[in-house]
Amino acid sequence: MKKIAILTSGILPVPAVQGGAVENLVDYYLAYNEQHRLYDITVYSVWHPDVEKHPARQSAVNHYYYIKTETLWAKIKKKTHQLTHGQEYYHYTIEYFLEQAMKHIGRQHYDLIILENRPGFALSVRKKTSARLVYHLHNDHLNSTTPQANDIYEAATGIITVSDYISSRVRSICPNDRKCHTVHNGIDLQLFQKAAECNDASGMTLVYTGRIIREKGIGELIDAMLLLKDYPEISLMVIGGSFYANSNDADDFIEELRQKAEPIRNRIRFTGFVPYVKVPGLLAMADVAVLPSTWDEPFGLTVTEALAAGLPIITTRKGGIPEIVTDQNAILLNADEHLPESLANAILYLYQHKEKRDSLAAASSQQAARFSKEVYAQNFFQCIMNYEL
């Protein structure tokens, strides 16, 4: 059985006891490996007390090597690392994690090493091992403007991206690229489908899920709601917090949104951060998902979750989103200066045409099957097998 090492991002633990989209996706393909016994895999992850008794650690084929980064002694060592190493590719806390992982990797033999969303790790890893390197890119972290882009690109045997959009960004380095392969993300469809079966809400409730940051288009959505002030039957539920954003800026932005929504405050509900396991139940209360991102989404997990929940979707043609939805299950809008008006028109159209909502919803449920965690893991390992050749 061939041996694989997985270098995680050095921020959140695997298993995903603290959440994290990337970490959950790693869990999905590790579960698939446990079921099918494809490889002997060792995961290098930051430590968290909740991983100690996690059932995933009982696996015979998936192993976990933990690096403590938050103890007092680890913090001292991280600071020492910063002072002794100077400027490195990533923040010194991440570089410290990599250094500790490489001490162990250097004593092992791996056939292949997967770098989860940290292509810059390759600059150090390639000096310590002859194992093939595969990058799993969840974000736009490798393109022609990336520092040392050519060196990082050349070090890879293969590059797995979450969307054709991210692949196109890598190809800005090498237009004739043959290393990139797209593997769309997957989710636990059952979690959302069971909730969808409970949907008996009356009226028309819109739902937005995701981080509360400007780039997600939530400001434009509230502007659209203000344009629809004469339609009190239309309400909006905003699910999410500002995690991963600068906390001060994010708090200011959320307060700005609340003030903007004040004239129709009885029709807009801000839930704040909600644990992932509770999101399906909230989606089940909605009639339409509105996800008006104004930046180039690498993939769009919230769009996939809305599909699985059987919701009609209003979204934008940004990044990888058009790879997830079609005209049969979504209304796709341009993310331009007219977005608030476009959103208002699309919302009003669905409000006035329930038969259209129903047809979009049925198509969403069918489309969701493409994005199961099982399909994702199977496609992921097919790429890995190809890179072995």
Image (cartoon, grey):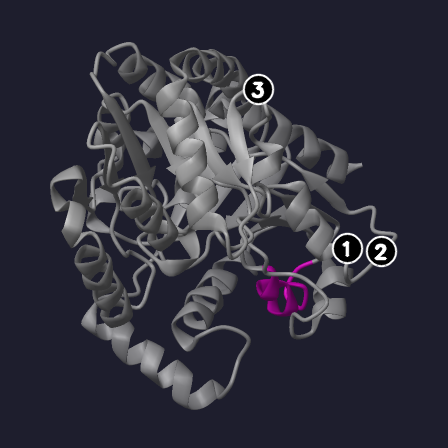
Disc 2, SS: loop
Is mark 1 in CB contact (under 8 Å) with mark 2?
yes
Q: Residue at x 76, y 34 (%)?
A: 386
Q: CA distance from mark 1 to mark 2?
A: 5 Å
Q: Which residue is mark 2?
A: 175
Name the residue type under label 3.
Gln
Q: CA distance from mark 1 to mark 3?
A: 30 Å
Q: Residue at x 51, y 14 (%)?
A: 363
Precedes in sequence: disc 1 or disc 3: 1
Q: Which residue is mark 3?
A: 328
Q: Which residue is mark 1?
A: 171
The quadrant in which the C terminus is found is: top right
Residue 382, horizontal then vertical, whole percent: 68, 28
Residue furthest to the front in view is 230
Residue 325, horizontal then vertical, whole percent: 56, 29
In the rendered image, the vertical position of residue 116 relative to residue 151, given as above or below = above
Q: Which picture quadrant has residue 239?
A: top left
Residue closest to the eye, 301 or 77: 301
Residue 107 numbered tag: none
Is mark 1 in CB contact (under 8 Å) with mark 3?
no
In the rendered image, the vertical position of residue 79 relative to residue 213, given as above or below = below
Q: Residue at x 32, y 39 (%)?
A: 208
Residue closest to the eye, 199 or 36: 199
Left or right of 130? Residue 389 is: right
Q: Is residue 220 magenta?
A: no
